[in-house]
Image: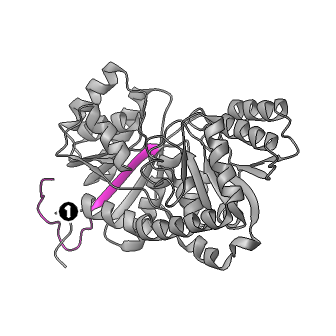
Amino acid sequence: MALLPALPADRRPRVLHFVTGGFSGATQVAVDLVRAHAASGRCDALLALRRKRHTPPERVQALRDEGLAVELVPGWAHAATVWQLAALCRRWRPDVLVAHGFSEHLWGRYAGLIAGVPRLVHVEHNSRERYSAWRLRQALWLAERTEAIVGVSEGVRQSLLARGFPPEKTIAIPNGIHLAPYERADAMAWADRVPGIVMAARFARQKDHATLLRAVALLRDRGLAPPVKLAGGGKASAQRAARKLCAELGLDGQVEFLGHCGDVPGLLMRHRICVLATHFEGMPLSLIEGMAAGCAVAGSRVVGVQEVIADGRNGLLAAHADPAALADALQRLLTQHEDAERMARAARADALRLYGMATMTARYEDLLLRGLEAPR
């Protein structure tokens, strides 16, 4: 990254984070970084959200109420997004624009170029995005004008390199979670936990609730009927499909759809097993949360998940979209208690050591502010 002259002592660097207003995982990472900037005092930060039809105004207002600077830009057309974001950049004059997620990283960097923002950063949040040939050409063109390209896991970084992104600019900064809500995990004895399964993930095409439900049906046929809690909102159509499959499999009395859960840490710490059945991931934060909560974890063998779970050491991997393989993994965790507890302890240790929010935000700030801060 090129070094810029240090700013005057009375002028803090300004960092603008641009991300979807759909409150996805990418949105949460951007919000956490804006909070971290406010806490560290190293820079001034602004969050720009691309308005979606389902952007909840109450969540936007909640961010403003906690003191974060938040602006909305239109999302009904790409040109409108670029035009309004460029106007915002001219008005606020950021030193760094961080464009999160697909396809926002395209429109964000176009706006930054138009407005003359000195430094652009692209953050890729998933290992499998909808790159058409034309959009990939745009992304590679923009990469030449971008200071750094961040993958939220080593798996995402590798997927970027496979698409032709420049290796000298492409790095991995694993996503992190807030560890404080999980401080009580060690006090939640394994024997006292509910021998049940939790999957905390939004309902979307990316997530594979169907494989989990079919695996639970197989477990029932093997004489195991653990309670299953599905926490998360998401697309109504995906939720309806999951509920329909649940009824067809005869699991209505065993599987509970919780919707949005206000206390995911508490839910996880009360249970023994956390599972993430998914088709692809960037960095599976819901799985990291399960690890921090002291759960035994199981996940699909896909990019993102397989970088977090060392099969047999801190959790179990199951073949992608394979109900029988996932049922085998869950059966092992449900019946081999000492083995499951051993993996749960290793998973919690890994979460505390590798995936704390402080570690993630410090790495981002060091990257974004390199050469910009006034001498201390």
Q: Which of 276 and 325 is in front in this view?
A: 325
Residue 304 versus residue 373: which sits nearer the camera? 304
Residue 64's quadrant in the figure?
A: bottom right
Q: Is residue 10 part of the magenta span, yes or no? A: yes
Q: Residues within 10 Å of mark 1 (few under 14, many from 20)?
A: some
Say whether residue 235 is visible.
no
Above or below, 294 relative to 330: below
Locate residue 44 relative to residue 327 in the image: left or right: left
Secondary structure mostly seen in magenta is: loop
Q: Residue 256 in the image: x percent, y percent?
A: 80, 48
Total marks in image: 1
Image x and y of residue 165, in percent: 24, 36
Give yes or no for residue 315 being in the magenta stretch: no
Query: Does any portion of residue 301 appear in the rendered image?
Result: yes
* 315 vs 13, nearest the viewer: 315
- Identify which residue is drawn at 19% across, 74% down: 9
The residue identified by callout 1 is 370
For image coordinates 45% across by 55% down, the residue present is 310
Q: Which residue is drawn at 34% across and 55% down?
A: 173
Way the structure is coloured: one colour
Range of residues picked out in magenta = 1-19
Q: Which amino acid does label 1 sit on?
A: Arg
Residue 307, above or below 246 = below
